[in-house]
Amino acid sequence: MPDEIPIGQPNRTPTPISFQPKKNTLLVSHGRPPWYGEDGHRISDAFVVGIAGGSGSGKTHVARQIVRSLGSIPSVVILSQDSFYKHHTPEELALAHASAFDFDHPDSIDMPMFAKCLSELKGCQQSNIPVYSFTTHQRLEEPKYLYGAAIILAEGIMALQDPGLRELYDLKLFVQCDSDLMLARRIKRDVEERGRDVDGILEQYLRFVKPAYDNYVLPSQRHADIIVPGSNNTVAIDLICTHIRRKLQEQSNSFRQKMAIPHLYASPSGIMIPECRLEDLSLTILPQTRQLKGIFTILRSRTSSRQDFIFFVDRLSTVIMEYALQYLPYSSRTVTTPMEAAFTGKVMSAKYVCGVSVLRSGGALDRGFRRVLHDVPLGSLLVQSNSSDGEPLLLHVMLPVCVRKRHMAEETWVFLLDAQIGTGAAAFMAIRILLDHGVKPEHIIFVTFLVARGGGISVLRRAFPKVNIVTAGVDDTMQEGRLDGSQGEGSSGRQVWAMMPGLGQIGDRYYL
Amino acid sequence: MATPVAPPQPATNKSQMNPLPPSVFTLPQTAQLEALYTIIRSKETSRGDFLFYSDRIIRLLVEEGLNHLPVVKKVVETPTGATYEGVGFEGKICGVSILRAGEAMEAGLREVCRSVRIGKILIQRDEETALPKLFYSKFPQDIASRYVLLLDPMLATGGSAMKAVEVLIEHGVPEDRIIFINLIASPEGLRTFCTKYPQLKVITGWIDLGLNEKAYIIPGLGDFGERRYCE
């Protein structure tokens, strides 16, 4: 998975990023904390820094130094202007291959696309950014999917040139460097990384790069908040990072007060929040048949064998999935049977259907999902709660293509799978991620074994009233306590919010 | 504030037969069940899809059939230390499939009832008398003490199903301990069957229009065994 590079364990001290940060790649140091409040709405935009400067002035270096100096940051992306070169006509292509195309003029950059992608990322949505190949001088067919950055560093010679872009920046930097140094760096880079010859580079420099710098790049420095030296800039970077940290701190202070974490959902004594009556939660509860009750009895019993537990989880997940399928849209269809008789029935009419399981315990529903929907994509999210404060952390996102692409996401129906809704923290985050991608709330079908009435479900329901929630059963309360027989995640008897009577930690019982 | 749309209410399949005999149970008539039947009925459907979607219906039918088995109260302790008043399954079961189409339902049965014992029975029409005749049967030895899930996908005239029940009763299985599971039934077959064995529960997925002159169900889905195994 080249898209994301999670480092370190969520429950331990975050490890600083210690490698050469790649461009257009989401860099994650320790998982992403909630970016939304109890009402389900986003609390703040991503923090966007614009970095302009001449070619070879050291913009990328400055961006990378900022990433390094910030150290423990939730998630950051360096967005490069190079990705946004326009799609070339055959004539332009011929010029480009002859080193005779002006890549340094503002018109060569697809500014509206740059601004669109940046504004999507700033608004915490997914963005599918174009990929430009310097070898073929052409924009590639398949864009690159990015999602979930808390800080965005947008760099490019024209980064401060376009007013539409400038509006999106929270901080504007201009990297100042001597022309001879810039040329020296440019020659070295183009020869080593892009396979050009020196004559071509020099011709291009005098013909396009220098005039563009004098006419467009240098004048744009008047828009900058800070001018950064192109070399020996440790002090400047330190000042910038201090500023960014302070701004992020201001955000997160207001953030924590409103953050959707478990202690807001249930009182420590486990007493139910009074307003959450079952009928207000609009849950779809499976018909409580004899078999269902019998299956639950086996699943709840601490003495059930592993074999039985796995078998009945698979059987129950199949039953729930069959039941949940009624939320898909259907339209009428007439077919001819082998008896040459007509039969008017129904056909499922959703354009795209997919599943997303919230790992680890959501994986317990995968088998049932596959028995019912064998040919649709099944993505996953890894959300773990931080053991110290119960704050959920997003560690990994692997979503189906029909969710990644925004225009498809609007017509996609998603079965969101998680074993239970207790505190609701993981469910909350998973739903927010789908909404960020443009999935309609009424197209989300949350499928689960068990919901705690006294848990986070009431907050979840208030925040996302249109999401369908299908559950096999409902328990009354949540209690804070040590979980019996819990293994894994390197802890002995974790402090957890447990559902009562519950069925224990489903993930542990299903997998360990 | 918009609330989620209420799921369509389960309706019984009464359009072809009203009232249903008291021993007949159908699946909730949801849009998605209709969609499943639309797929398996269409003559355009590939064998792969026919297998997958008929298995889904069979699982739903078996789940429904099992709900008619008795349960006893059972109290267990959960991993969180709480007690839960649940139920335990009571009584042993076995499946009996009527060859050859009934075998197609065994996979679905075993997905719901792990390692369940399965008896077999072959009944064919006697060309001299034109009556169904027992050719072969193999049952678990203790079948008389088990609940029997009798499997045959199509209930047309009901002739072979009634013959199968007759054989089971001869082997000591009480009538009220047999549950007959099928995907599609004809109203005339259902009427004959339920009149002869009123104590026996029938779980059917769909009640169709009726039979044609060759005693095939209309609109039906053709020959289930043929489509599942041969086409």
Image (cartoon, rainbow, N blue to C red):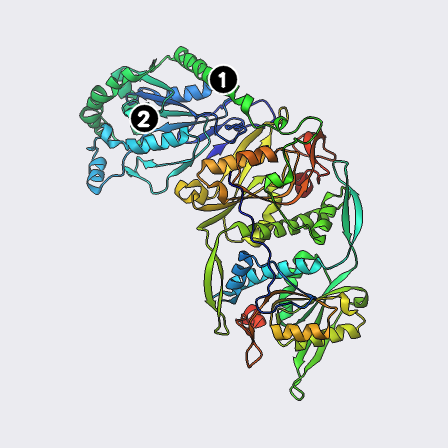
Image disc number at residue A289? none
Q: Report the front residue among A84 and B177.
A: B177
Relative depth, front residue between A157 and A482: A482
Hey, which residue is sitting farthest top in the picture? A235
From the top left corner, tell me how far across and down residue A172 is, in percent.
35, 18
Badge number at residue A165: 2
Percent x, y of residue B90:
79, 56
Judge whether residue A15 can be spotted in this image.
Answer: no
- Alpha-carbon distance for marks 1 and 2? 25 Å
Secondary element type, mark 1? helix
Left or right of A118, for residue A292: right
Residue A474, image quadrant: top right
For image coordinates 23% across by 30% down, the residue present is A107
Q: Locate residue A496 relative to residue B172 in the image: left or right.
A: left
Any part of residue A271 in sight: yes
Q: Amino acid at mark 1?
A: Gln
The residue depicted at 60 percent of the width and 65 percent of the height is B14
**Residue underneath mark 1:** A249
Q: Secondary structure at mark 2?
A: helix
Question: Could you tell me residue A188's position as x and y percent?
Answer: 30, 24
Callout 1 and callout 2 share a chain: yes
